[in-house]
């Protein structure tokens, strides 16, 4: 177990493309950090740099007390779970799990004992003699986990480990991985593009966009106080409503007709982006804000109403007991849960 | 609609449900296959029958249909009777020489081309692609083109009439390198990375992961190369002058050239034909034995 420190770690490819801009993060011992972002945001590159599968262009990476920039992946005492599991197809489950130990010169008895222990934790006892091709997706995923835990690594790296599983299994494995990680207390870095996975599993989330770190924070910090319009739009489903507004005479105005009864942000700008989480908005009100509902989405536990507010698209989420129909609906915008962003830079005001 | 129902009732009434229906298509397929099999097998059967005749009959009447009593005798002579000008080589010896050539040729080609492909695919060599294309263009330079310099080199190294001289100049293989390169490139990158994290160095990765994954590919190339090596004629003819080093393919020719000492002074056709039948057996066995792997190697990949 170890603390992982990234100090201005940067990745530039020979063709000049900057995949990861200088990134500084400290991951304390035992924490699970999720790297999240859309495809091509550099999250996998960052993970692969930590693993040692990609060279670090600049900056320093330490695992525990040592700087490991130039260490081989095998010498970093890490274990990695890949998206397609990367199990050795010609080896049995037991051999797959024990291969890393064997290469480190562990004795046969030690390998057997550790593999049996991992198999017990992961409920794989009955499958030790099978080949990966004879296992289901979830079982393969477990074997990949087993291969990671038998080595008692200081750091787990997960590269979108659940994206090849179906939705139900994904939810189940999400909980299993989290429980296992907490039980073993191993520092972990987890890459995903799924914001639900990020929210549910992380101690802390790092949101990446275009190779740049947009925000680092706990799931609730990220959700409650997104640092930019990108984070606001990426985390949460449906995403936060973001609308262009003008600040006139100390009031926020959407367009000619819709005036929001809101205190404007402290920073003085003419225009501003104003954001509301769909679930923070309530139906009913004094008529100062009217949502033109175009579509009602029925989700069982709640309903999503999509429409326009002051000519700009707007969605709200209401409880299943509230009446929802197409047409104009008065809504109440929360005074205390409003987010303001800079109109050009997109940063939080 | 009416037509449709009518024709379907017609069909059901015609076909009797209990008898398996013979489709015309199947009959045609089988007829073609049987004709093909006959065409391929007939020469072999003809040769087998001819081996049962006296050499004199063969000289007089050519290949024969039917059976006489000499078959066993001819096969025995082919296998165990010393022949050639120097009377030093038997069929068994030639079979062994051919076996050594075939196996050495196939195994050598597989080892060399696998290692070459491994280097090209997995090591960040500066000129890997160029090296590959240079290897690949050697396909345009078959043995026949470089045979004189090759002979000269082997001769001056003193390797004429040795197994080394017989095998080594032939084992560089552009085809094998190409096949293995394509195969290695289809192995998922993550597998390589997982092995790196598991602490497998280049040699361990090659032995523990690459070789087992390439099993079917190795089998496929082994068959092709064994048969190809077994049938080599030109190079063994040049490099082996000592009759003790003769391979089967080379030796059969020799038997026909050496006139029988039994008095009649005619070529020992029966013996030569028997030997050519024997020469067919090992490649056939190899193909039968490896054929399921061969098909797998060419069509599917267990990854």
Image (spheres, rainbow, N blue to C red):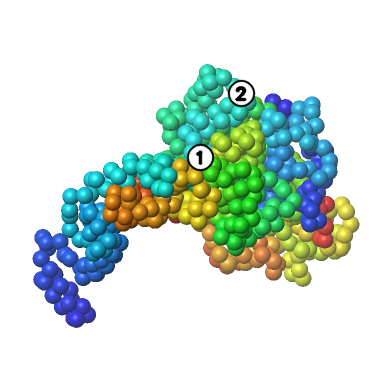
Q: Is residue A324 visible?
A: no
Is label 1 in a helix, a strand or a loop?
A: helix
- Which mark is drawn over residue A117? none
From this viewpoint, which residue is outermost toward the right? A268
Q: CA distance from mark 2 to mark 1?
A: 21 Å
From this view, report whether residue B218 is shown above or below residue A6.
below
Q: As drawn, is B128 to the left or to the right of B285?
A: right
Is label 2 in a helix, a strand or a loop?
A: loop
Q: Looking at the image, is mark 2 or mark 1 nearer the viewer?
A: 1
- Which mark is drawn over residue A105? 2
Q: As drawn, is B117 to the left or to the right of B257?
A: right
Question: Residue, x 27% and y 61% (percent of image)?
Answer: B59
Q: Residues within 10 Å of mark 2 (few under 14, many from 20)?
A: few
Residue occupied by mark 1: B212
Say which of B53 and A212 sits in front: B53
Question: Residue, x 25% and y 58% (percent of image)?
Answer: B56
């Amino acid at each position: 177990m170890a603390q992982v420190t990234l100090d201005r770690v940067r990745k530039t490819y020979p063709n000049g493309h900057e995949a990861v801009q200088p990134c500084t993060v400290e991951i304390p011992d035992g924490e699970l950090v999720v790297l999240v972002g859309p495809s091509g945001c550099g999250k996998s590159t960052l993970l692969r740099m930590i693993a040692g599968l990609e060279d670090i262009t600049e900056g320093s990476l330490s695992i525990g007390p040592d700087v490991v920039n130039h260490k081989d992946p095998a010498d970093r005492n890490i274990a990695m779970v890949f998206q397609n599991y990367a199990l050795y197809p010609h080896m049995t489950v037991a051999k797959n799990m024990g291969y890393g130990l064997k290469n480190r010169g562990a004795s046969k008895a030690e390998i057997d004992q550790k593999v049996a222990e991992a198999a017990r934790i992961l409920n794989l006892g009955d499958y030790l003699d099978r080949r990966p091709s004879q296992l289901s997706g979830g079982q393969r995923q477990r074997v990949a986990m087993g291969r990671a835990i038998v080595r008692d690594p200081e750091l787990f790296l997960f590269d979108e480990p659940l994206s090849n599983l179906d939705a139900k299994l994904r939810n189940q494995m999400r909980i299993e991985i989290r429980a296992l990680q907490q039980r073993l207390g191993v520092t972990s870095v987890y890459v995903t593009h799924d914001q639900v996975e990020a929210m549910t599993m992380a101690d802390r989330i790092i949101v990446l966009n275009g190779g740049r770190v947009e925000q680092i924070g706990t799931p609730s910090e990220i959700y409650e106080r997104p640092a930019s319009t990108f984070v606001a739009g990426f985390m949460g489903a449906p995403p936060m409503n973001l609308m262009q507004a003008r600040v006139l005479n100390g009031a926020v105005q959407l367009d000619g007709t819709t005036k929001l009864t809101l205190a404007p942000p402290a920073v003085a700008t003419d225009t501003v982006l104003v954001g509301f989480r769909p679930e923070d908005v309530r139906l009913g009100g004094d008529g100062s804000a009217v949502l033109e509902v175009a579509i009602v989405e029925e989700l069982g536990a709640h309903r999503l109403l999509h429409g326009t507010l002051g000519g700009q698209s707007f969605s709200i989420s209401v409880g299943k007991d509230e009446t929802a129909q197409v047409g104009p609906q008065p809504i109440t915008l929360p005074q205390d849960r409003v987010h303001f962003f800079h109109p050009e830079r997109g940063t939080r005001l | 609609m009416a037509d449709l129902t009518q024709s379907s009732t017609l069909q059901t009434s015609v076909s009797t449900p209990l008898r398996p229906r013979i489709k015309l298509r199947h009959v045609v397929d089988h007829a073609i296959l049987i004709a093909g099999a006959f065409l391929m097998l007939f020469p072999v059967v003809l040769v087998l029958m001819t081996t049962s005749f006296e050499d004199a009959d063969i000289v007089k009447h050519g290949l024969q249909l039917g059976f006489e009593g000499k078959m066993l005798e001819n096969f025995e002579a082919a296998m165990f009777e010393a022949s050639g000008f120097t009377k030093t080589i038997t069929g068994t010896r030639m079979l062994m020489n051919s076996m050594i050539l075939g196996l050495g040729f196939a195994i050598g080609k597989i080892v060399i081309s696998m290692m070459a492909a491994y280097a090209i695919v997995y090591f960040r060599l500066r000129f890997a692609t160029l090296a590959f294309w240079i290897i690949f263009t050697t396909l345009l330079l078959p043995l026949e083109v470089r045979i004189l310099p090759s002979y000269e080199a082997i001769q001056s190294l003193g390797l004429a009439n040795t197994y080394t001289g017989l095998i080594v100049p032939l084992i560089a293989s552009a085809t094998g390198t190409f096949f293995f390169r394509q195969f290695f490139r289809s192995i998922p990158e993550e597998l390589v990375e997982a092995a790196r994290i598991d602490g497998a160095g280049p040699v361990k990765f090659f032995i523990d992961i690459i070789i087992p994954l390439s099993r079917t590919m190795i089998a496929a190339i082994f068959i092709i190369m064994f048969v190809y090596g077994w049938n080599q004629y030109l190079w063994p003819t040049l490099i082996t002058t000592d009759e003790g080093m003769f391979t089967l393919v080379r030796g059969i020719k020799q038997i026909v050239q050496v006139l029988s000492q039994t008095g009649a002074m005619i070529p020992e056709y029966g013996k030569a034909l028997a030997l050519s039948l024997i020469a067919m057996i090992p490649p056939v066995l190899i193909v039968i034995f490896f054929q399921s792997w061969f098909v797998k190697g060419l069509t599917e990949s267990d990854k």
